[in-house]
Image: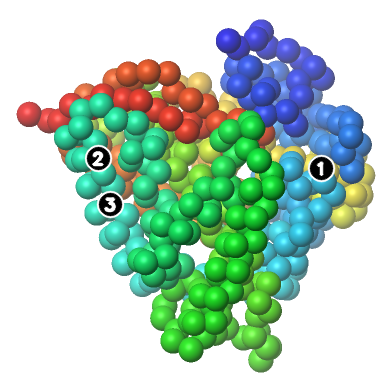
Amino acid sequence: MAVATQPPGAVDLSDPQTFLDHELVPMWQRFRRESPVHWHAVEGWKVPGFWVLSRYDDVMSVYRDNKRFTSERGNVLATLLEGGDSAAGKMLAVTDGRRHRELRNLLLKAFAPRVLERVVEGVRRRADRLVRQGLERGDCDFAQDIAEHIPMATIADLLGVPASDRDYLLSLTKQALSAEEADQSGDEALVARQELLLYFADLAEDRRENPESDVVSVLATATIDGEPLTEQEIVFNCYSVIIGGDETSRLSMIGGMHELMEHPEQWRRLSSGEVSVDSAVEEVLRWVTPAMHFGRRALTDVEIGGTTIRADDVVTLWNTSANHDEEIFDDPGTFDLGRTPNKHVSFGYGPHFCLGAYLGRAEIHAMLTALRTHVSEAAPTGPAKPIHSNFLRGYSSLPVSMRPHR
Ligand code: HEM
């Protein structure tokens, strides 16, 4: 049961439970209105607290500024509060400066439309098949039976993981990344993460001999200034595609389905073709905002909205609030699949703008297309189960009953 909206100073944003207990829309409204550049103290961490930016323009200004703000000491609360990220300077999302540009340019090759065409075709086929199978069953868990089977299969295609290894990879990533259970064992996750890195080291070795057009081959055969990438750079960046692309896309598709059921008039607009799937994808991304925040460390003193952020301070950027900023979005509290313009920040902005945005969009597009094509009605058959996280937002279970078009 959501509690009454509290003032910004009374909300603990480091605690995952906060995001389950509070009505988030009014909570962020208060942040934007009462304390848009808000100091949030914490205890028991390596840092004394962090800044909370909730207005769209402030969030964008930090995303675009990788000169005065760095990602190299973490880019999400979990690592920022720990004081650093062990993959800093090697993994794209937590690397800055020249090395970031070089690595990003390399990876962009593997995300080129020519390569992605094949991957996106797989996404469409898979979404269509899974929705039809769900319909045959009538009742299913949209999260576990449908949405879960798309992102990892897509990432495996992108990375070039052989069919025989896919189940193994899936079970490892589940253990390594599952943010869904509050009682998840940290040790198991650590072991699984190590095994994943070893797996990619082996695959890279193989691809160095027999390169193809996938991400692992690109990383394994690349050189920068005549030097190959280090093994750590290769494996961390394979891993980063999984971290970046699995849960975010999955939660977007699940959230999209959840909202379509909550807003039957929007489902009708989508089914009848009154709104395009393209604009529906953008509104699902804005409304769901699966990655609630990202963050940075300040490298120098910076003034934001009349407040001085000191060098070394942790700054968090709340996409989930920026995407509801009434200064930017007309009627932000309305879920409107035909919304234009829709300049949401769900994929971030600037130098670290999501590398997988095209693919993420393609996955949501494929899912909405499959739903519009095959499903006439859907209704929840039980409570949706929200995930427990201060970073990601969405559901790990969504029991539904679906009926086909006549
Ligand atoms: C970066 C969101 C899908 C790979 C980011 C960032 C955001 C984001 C907000 C910026 C992080 C920062 O500024 O610190 C999302 C959402 C997705 C999605 C909402 C789905 C709906 C994907 C997919 C992939 C991917 C499918 C890969 C297959 C990455 C990578 C980065 C990144 C590698 C780091 C880019 C860099 O630092 O230059 N993502 N993402 N993402 N994303 Fe995504």
Please name the amino acid that badge 1 sits on.
Answer: Leu
C-alpha span from label 2 to label 1: 40 Å
Q: Nearer the viewer, residue 386 or 36?
A: 386
Query: Does residue 339 appear to the left or right of 379 in the view shown?
Result: right
Please name the amino acid that badge 2 sits on.
Answer: Val
Which labelled disc corresponds to residue 126? 3
The image quadrant that residue 153 belongs to is bottom left
Position of the N terminus, as image quadrant, is: top right
Query: Does residue 312 appear to the left or right of 114 in the view shown?
Result: right
* The residue carrying mark 2 has its beta carbon less than 8 Å from ligand 1: no
Q: Earlier in the sequence, mark 3 or mark 2?
A: 3
Which residue position is annotated with label 1?
A: 81
Please name the amino acid that badge 3 sits on.
Answer: Arg
Q: Earlier in the sequence, mark 3 or mark 1?
A: 1
Which residue position is annotated with label 2?
A: 131
The residue that appears at 46% across and 54% down in the rendered structure is: 170
Q: Which residue is most to the top?
A: 4
Q: Which residue is most to the bottom?
A: 226
Q: Nearer the viewer, residue 349 or 240?
A: 240
Query: Residue 103's x, y, as percent?
Result: 63, 72
Position of the C terminus, as image quadrant, is: top left
Q: Which element type, helix, strand or loop, lies under badge 1?
A: helix
Query: Does residue 236 appear to the left or right of 220 in the view shown?
Result: right
Q: Nearer the viewer, residue 198 or 21?
A: 198
Query: Residue 309's x, y, as percent?
Result: 88, 41
